[in-house]
Amino acid sequence: MTTYDPPLRDMRFVLNEFLQVQNLSNLPGFAEATPDLIDAILEEGAKLHSEVIHPINQSGDKEGCRHEGDRVTTPKGFKEAYDTYSEGGWNGLTFPEEYGGQGLPYAIGIAISEMTDTANVAFAMYGGLTRAAATALLTHATEEQKTKYVPNMIAGKWSGTMNLTEPHCGTDLGMMRTKADPQGDGSYKITGTKIFISAGEHDLTENIIHLVLARTPGGPEGTKGISLFLVPKFFVNDDGSLGDRNGVACGAIEDKMGIHANSTCVMNFDDAVGYMVGDEFKGMRAMFTMMNAARIGVGLQGLGQSEVSYQNAVTYAKDRLQGRSLTGPKFPDKPADPIIVHPDVRRMLMDQKSFNEGARAALYWLALQADIAYQAQDEKDKEKAEDYLALFTPVVKGYFTDRAFAHAVNAQQVYGGHGYIKEWGMDQFVRDARIAMIYEGANGIQALDLVGRKLGAHGGRAIMSFLGELNAYVQEHEGNAELEPFMVALKSVKEHLQSAVTWLMQNGLKNPDNAGAASTDFMHLMGITLLTYMWTQMAQRLSAGGHDASDPYYDAKLKTARYYVDRLTPEADAHLKKILAGSEAMMALEADAF
């Protein structure tokens, strides 16, 4: 039986001491987010996730979902846990109060989302997709549609989905065939089949609100002809009650490698009645509101699987006796030392610990950029925050989930042979982590999006702003002796990133294969730079004092920071060298030679 103990001490540090959210009372929602309130939210969230939601993670994986007729049943305990989660108001933590939410900042909500993703990622997907769908509706729907659908989604009575992929097209949505025929009364008949639809059908909520991409007659080819439609599982009457069932049904649930407790469905739309969301032919823009939220959420899922596998591996490493320390017995009264004394076990655990804490800081910081982008009054602040959201979303989705899968594998490795045995639960973390690298845009696509779109957007404004911020930080703190190892690392990785950006600008347009060949390494270089910057800032905050130096947490934090810059920041060197190698060797072989 695996366990999960939410890392409240580190969450508090990131929110209160690193980001200092209490100083942002000028932004809506932050004035109410006092340290005492944040503490209360985190404490209650921790109880729910450690005592209710994580205990059904392994059993849910083993049982999976069942499909019978037009019904899908979730594993034992999921319905009760979802009701408890919804009744506690956790789904609506960051949504506007006018729609039944609590109006708290996204930077606070992301801490609870981390707990859910860590405790039980398959369970988390039901609420996560609902929140993403509700966000898309709040951004693009009519007032009538918002009033009719969003409050019940926020309350957890109804859930939401996103329907993009079809059997013949995944990333290339321009090949989409699902059609939407206008009925003359403002509604459309939706016909087609969508696949890989997470939470497409289940027994957790009374209704499911599907957001569906489809083509209207006579529209342009490719993605320019796609519109977004709201298709409820059950019609909603004027008084808010549920009416007849719509023409949408689950045709099958996929037999997957992991996330067994989430119903991944083939959805058949047979003259289903739908209602357009936003403008005709602007469906991709509306859906990207949902997809970008989901991509940050998938980065958070990566952190979650890295964190929970780390916690369980640490427990095992402290208990498992095997061999003696290379420098002499550490527990001479025992037949062997616990394996945590061995440097290679430490390597795997410290790789995880330093990533987890750095990624937590980066994700909470990115959530804060979302709050600033949506709420700030100063247009320059909003612009910078929007730029950073666009630039770093593919990084946290792609790089974080790449690392998280590797970390789940290493946590399994700590267990040795026991890690390969199902009852220990480590295989589930590996299997569940694997999907995060694939869905919401495979990581290779994230890397291409980063170098092909985000890097050059607005004349390279976002990356130039970030490099400028790094330069200013280095100049301000370079003479600080206590920060010397951190500043050396940050300066080095900053120069690597600058070199990579310059090379891509000079060679990417000249030969697009150069950009494609460099894309994944560039995404990883960006990720390492971001985490190095996060760790350097956290170390700087600690070196400035103002905290209880006797608290062992702070000493461990600085030692973890030093590990990251000494052992993991140097990986940037290899990524830069591979970027500068270009595409010639990668593209040299003819296809028949493979």
Image (cartoon, grey):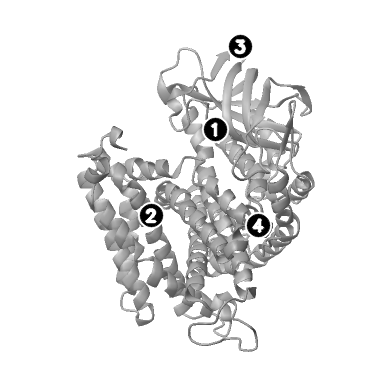
Residue 35 pos. (x, y %): 63, 67
- Mark pair 3, 1: CA separation: 22 Å
Q: Secondary structure at mark 4?
A: loop
Quadrant including the C terminus: top left
Where's residue 355, x and y in %? 48, 63
How far separated are the C-alphas under marks 1 and 4?
42 Å
Residue at image point 61% right, 22% down: 275
Of callouts 1 and 4, the N-terminal one: 1
Of badges 3 and 2, nearer the viewer stands: 2
Find the distance from the CA under tag 3 to the CA under tag 4. Answer: 52 Å
Q: Which residue is mark 2?
A: 524
- Among numbered discs 2 and 1, the one appearing first in the sequence: 1
Q: Is residue 572 left or right of residue 205?
A: left
Give, as a three-letter code, the residue at label 3.
Gln
Which is more foreground, mark 2 or mark 1? 2
Residue 567 in the image: above or below residue 85: below
Residue that mark 1 sits on: 140
Q: Amino acid at mark 1?
A: His
Q: Secondary structure at mark 2?
A: helix
Task: Check the image and report above or below for 50 versus 321.
Answer: above
Residue beneath label 3, please? 183
**Mark carried by residue 425:** 4
* Of callouts 3 and 4, the N-terminal one: 3
Badge 1 crowding class, 10 Å Cα cut-off, few under 14, some 14 to 19, many 20 or more, is some
The residues bearing labels 2 and 1 have C-alpha atoms spaced at a distance of: 33 Å
